[in-house]
Image (tube, rainbow, N blue to C red):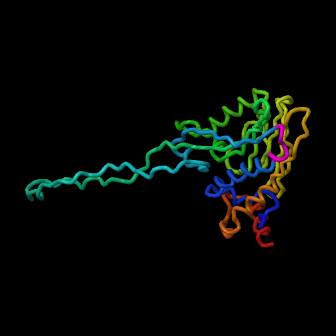
Amino acid sequence: MPSPFPGMNPYLEKPEYWSQVHKWLIVLIAQSLNPQLRPKYRVAIEERVYNATGDDSMLGRVGILPARKDHVVVQSSQSNHQDPSPLVTVAAPSVKAMKIALPMTEMVKEWYLEVRKLETGKVITVIEILSPKNKRSKAVGHATRSEGRSNYETKRQKILDSLTHLVEIDLLRQGKPMAMNNQAFQSHYRIVISRSQERPQADLYAFNLPQAIPSFPLPLQPEDTEPTVNLQQLLHQLYDQGSYDLAIDYSQDPPPPLSTADASWVKQVLIE
């Protein structure tokens, strides 16, 4: 069964589903491209690993290893002495311990794709699907910068400074979009195609919830015919193969909250 929405399914943005959707899309993109690229190229699934702490480790949970649920609690001591004499002043009741959670370090694993030339092993194109951690903006106050965003931005800049093409897919409404040379585009979702020979110019596919996800060409070397990635078809495929029609509760509102107009549109789609 395909997704009931013509474009992105907003319910798939729920953190408990998105970690699975992210992996599904990575695998399906590789499966769809490899037959078209052989024998010159191969699409490889790669992994970025880093440590995250505090709130950042809980955001999105893409590929996060299970965390321990330990809590450190200061317990009030118990006395073995007998009750004090009535002539002795009784102290106020001792302060009771409260449950608190301390920041824990967790290992985060994020999948991405590399299109490699088989003859030399050279990376021609990197395909990234953004996670909630990648889009988390700098924290307010004395908190440190999001490890997920910082790690991704560092890698992103290295790619943009190289001869490697970049495909950046953002199917999440939440979070701060990646920098586009101080240009602000108001859209729910974005796909950026950055060809190394055209930088700093890039192709932006900006689309909203009611719109179908646009197909896009995969940048390769100048002499190559660029295959088309039909992301919409792959999303319907993962929705069906992952049995998300059985998992999603469509009686609830999708996160993050929708505008009044978009919420009305979503309800109408589900009714139809």
Q: Position of residue 224 (x, y in %)?
A: 90, 36
Q: Position of residue 111 (x, y in %)?
A: 66, 44
* Residue at the (68%, 51%) spot, across then down: 22
115 up-or-down from 242: above or below: above
Magenta highlight on residue 251: no
Left or right: where does residue 241 sit relative to residue 138?
A: right
Residue at the farthest bottom position: 271
* Residue at the (26%, 52%) spot, across then down: 76
Q: Quadrant of the C terminus?
A: bottom right
Magenta highlight on residue 39: yes
Q: How many marks?
A: 0
Q: Nearer the viewer, residue 137 or 261?
A: 137
Where does the magenta region start and end?
33-40
Left or right: where does residue 222 sit relative to residue 143?
A: right
Q: Position of residue 144 (x, y in %)?
A: 54, 36
Give the main secondary structure, helix, strand or loop, of the magenta stretch: helix
Q: Quadrant of the N terminus?
A: bottom right
144 up-or-down from 11: above or below: above
- Can you tell which quarter of the image residue 252 is in? bottom right
